[in-house]
Each structure stands twice: as structure tokens, then as C-alpha cells.
Image (cartoon, rainbow, N blue to C red):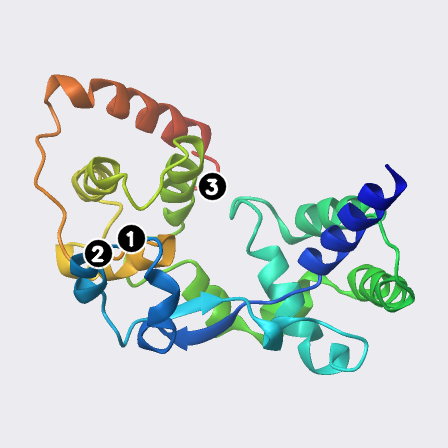
């Protein structure tokens, strides 16, 4: 049992201290062979930039100084966008405190990250990376902060790349509610949802008032009402 516990601890600390790196889909095409058919692979956009984890994405005591800002930014991206930075940092510190640590290097990394988190100030990110914050809100697609509504629906519905109807529903309903810019095309939207691992190039048309979309509309309006303070 002790051996199993040690293995689980090692996996936990190893999995936590990693970042995503960006590469083209075409560079890792072999990785898709066990999960996609040949036709599905052929439909992939080989030039699409995606995030992956590999040996180069492991955070160590040697590369901490170089990767710490990227690591922090990506960790913050795992939280609901409606959370404030202070709330995210508080949650992160709680997770870090409970993280099982075995190896000395990871104990050092944990201490360094705790110090990093306790020293950071919310205004620092706003001052240093305003363009990245604006990009994170995807204001080229969504008006104001309405990305929060999209994220809320996506998370609560546990959507995947197969949630085609839900993706199209969000596009049509948010367009109707004037939460997506009028100039945004379906093609631009499909490109955006690649961020959510939707790799197909089409989304079948739907009717918002169809009976099968009643529950979707009800849930959508509930999430929208709950986020009124955010969607100004």
C-alpha cells in the first residue's frame, strides 16, 4: 500500500508542475492515430496551433525562473473566468497546500510557487499584460465580458468537442442577445471554439425555438441572470 501511495504522490506532483507548449497539429499527427479515423485525421487543420504537454513542458528547479510566469498564467486559466485574481490565488494556495510532495525538487518548487503567489499583486498583471487580458476576454468575438456566460454554459453543461448543438446554440442565442458582435461570422466562431478542442469546420444549423432547445434556453437564461453583475 505504501508503494502505491508513493506512486500516486509522484504522479500528483509531476502532473501539477507542468505547462502546456504550443505546436502545430501536423507536428503530432501520429498521436491522433489511435483515437481518430483516417478520414477524421485528414479533416484536421494541420497548421492549427494547439497546446500539448511533453518532456519540454516539465517545470523543474532549473527552468523555474524562465517558466514561472507562464506556469502561473496557465494555472490561472484553469479557473472560472468570473473569479477575481485574488480568489484564484487563494484557491491555488489551498490546492498547493494539499498537494502531496515526495521529492526534494518538488518541495523546493512548492516553496518557490507559494512565495510567488503570496508576493503577486492583482494590479501587476493589469499593468504588465493588458493586451493578454483583453485577448483572454476574446473581445473580438464577444461584447464586453460576455465570454463569462459562454464559459459558464460550457462548464455547467460539461461540453466536449461532440457538443455540436450546444456550440451552435450558444452562437445563435448570444447573437440574438447582442452579446456577440454582428460582424462575427460562423466561421470565425468555429475557429474560436477550437480553444475548446472543437476541430471540425462546420456546425449544423438549429432553430432556437425548437422543442429540443427549450431546456438549453432555460439553462442559458439562468446562467445569464446569475452573471448579471459580471455582464455589464
Which image quarter: residue 45? bottom left
Examine the rendering and report whether any part of residue 197 can be seen: yes
Residue at (43, 37) in percent of width and height? 152
Task: Select label 3 or label 1 by which is in front.
Answer: 1
Instruction: Characterize the local packing of mark 3: few (<14), some (14-19) or many (20 or more) Cα atoms within 10 angstroms.
Output: some
Q: Is residue 143 above or below residue 177?
A: below
Instruction: Characterize the local packing of mark 2: few (<14), some (14-19) or many (20 or more) Cα atoms within 10 angstroms.
Output: some
Q: Which residue is mark 1?
A: 198
The answer to the question of whether label 2 and label 1 lie on touching residues, with beta carbons closer than 8 A, is yes
Disc number placed over residue 90 in the picture, else none:
none
Q: Is residue 76 left or right of residue 39?
A: right
Examine the rendering and report whether any part of residue 183 can be seen: no
Q: Which residue is mark 2?
A: 190
Q: Tag 3, which secondary structure? A: loop
The answer to the question of whether label 3 and label 1 lie on touching residues, with beta carbons closer than 8 A, is no
N-term mark: 3 or 1: 1
Q: Which residue is mark 3?
A: 230
Amino acid at each position: 500500500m505504501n508503494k502505491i501511495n508513493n506512486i500516486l504522490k509522484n504522479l500528483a506532483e509531476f502532473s501539477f508542475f507542468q505547462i502546456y507548449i504550443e505546436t502545430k497539429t501536423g507536428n503530432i499527427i501520429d498521436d491522433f492515430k489511435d483515437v481518430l479515423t483516417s478520414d477524421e485525421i485528414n479533416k484536421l487543420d494541420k497548421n492549427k496551433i494547439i497546446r500539448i504537454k511533453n518532456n519540454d513542458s516539465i517545470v523543474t528547479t532549473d527552468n523555474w525562473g524562465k517558466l514561472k510566469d507562464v506556469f502561473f498564467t496557465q494555472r490561472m486559466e484553469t479557473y472560472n473566468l468570473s473569479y477575481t485574481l485574488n480568489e484564484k490565488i487563494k484557491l491555488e494556495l489551498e490546492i498547493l497546500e494539499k498537494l502531496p510532495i515526495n521529492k526534494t525538487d518538488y518541495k523546493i518548487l512548492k516553496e518557490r510557487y507559494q512565495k510567488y503567489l503570496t508576493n503577486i499583486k492583482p494590479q501587476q498583471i493589469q499593468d504588465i499584460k493588458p493586451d493578454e487580458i483583453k485577448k483572454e476576454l476574446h473581445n473580438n468575438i464577444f461584447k464586453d465580458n460576455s465570454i463569462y456566460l459562454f464559459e459558464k454554459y460550457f462548464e455547467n453543461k460539461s461540453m466536449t468537442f461532440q457538443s455540436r448543438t450546444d456550440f451552435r446554440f450558444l452562437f445563435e442565442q448570444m447573437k440574438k442577445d447582442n452579446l456577440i458582435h454582428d460582424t462575427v461570422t460562423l466561421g470565425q466562431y468555429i475557429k474560436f471554439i477550437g480553444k475548446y478542442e472543437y476541430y471540425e469546420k462546420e456546425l449544423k444549423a438549429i432553430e432556437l425555438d425548437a422543442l429540443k432547445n427549450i431546456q438549453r434556453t432555460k439553462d442559458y437564461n439562468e446562467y445569464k441572470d446569475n452573471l448579471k453583475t459580471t455582464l455589464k
